[in-house]
Amino acid sequence: AQSETLTRMVNVILLGPPGAGKGTQAELLVKTHGLVQLSTGDMLRQAKASGSELGKRVAEVMERGELVTDDIVIGLIKEKLSDTKAKGFIFDGFPRTLAQADALGALLEEAGVTLSAAIELQVNDKILVERILHRAEQARAAGQPVRADDNEETLVQRLEAYHAQTAPLIDYYASKGVLKPVDAMGEIDAIAGELAAIVSQASA
Ligand code: B4P
């Protein structure tokens, strides 16, 4: 199995705009490489679903398509990093700002581990919009709840937040020599193959 080829801890970031396939690809890497997925989006949606104070605070922000404050998401990630048995982590949708990137760098250094790669999933805005609206349609057709931020109006704001606040991380990780750009406009399985190769190389 591919997971047996892992010889050291691998920590990868999945970077990319909404609909780039971060969640989709992270789940596949969990299956093939046994890494632990840390999705701040999922954690925030769970907080919202639980009806907790935190959930109430973040729900509106997410529905507007804006970013939740750095303190909140950094706090969520910090809690999860204490899983010392993990073979490595996939940071899915985190960091999304330079402050978050600095905080992650400090946390990893503290834990004595390095960042193996920041994988940038490259997809143009037209395809992103199609994918997100398709996800909403599929959920509706299946009688499942549609994500509160999967509509055209919120999506415009999510894309704006990405370009203004998250895209600068591409240069940030390039300057650290860990950026791996991947064309993520093709088939899910083909992209998964490229990501698996990057992770295997990082763990060899
Ligand atoms: P996220 O949950 O991260 O949502 P996302 O960016 O839309 O990505 P997601 O993983 O869900 O979708 P994917 O691309 O896999 O964030 C939601 C909100 O939470 C943010 O707007 C923000 O408010 C808040 N938040 C989260 N993290 C934060 C942070 N660190 N700081 C501040 N705020 C934060 O998939 C989309 C669709 O495309 C799916 O239907 C999938 O099936 C499809 N798809 C994927 N790959 C495909 C392919 N190759 N071909 C065709 N379809 C594909």
Image: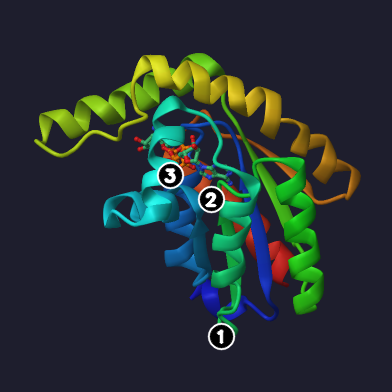
Q: CA distance from mark 2 to mark 3?
A: 38 Å
* Residue where numbered disc 3 is placed: 57
Task: Name which of mark 1 and mark 3 comes first in the sequence.
Answer: 3
* Residue where numbered disc 2 is placed: 193
Q: Amino acid at mark 3?
A: Arg
Q: Residues within 10 Å of mark 2 (few under 14, many from 20)?
A: some
Percent from the top left, x then y, of residue 131? 38, 26
Q: Amino acid at mark 2?
A: Gly
Q: CA distance from mark 2 to mark 1?
A: 26 Å
Residue 72 sits above or below residue 37 on the image: above
Q: Residue furthest front?
A: 53
* Residue where numbered disc 1 is placed: 85
Percent from the top left, x then y, of residue 23? 45, 47
Query: Which residue is painted at 44% across and 26% down in the image?
Result: 64
Q: Residues within 10 Å of mark 3 (few under 14, many from 20)?
A: some
Query: For disc 1, does the CB lie below 8 Å from ligand 1?
Result: no
Pointers 1 and 3 in contact (C-beta within 8 Å): no
Name the side, left or right, on which 184 lies relative to 151: right
- Give the structural element (helix, strand or loop) at label 2: helix
Residue 62 sits above or below residue 101 on the image: above
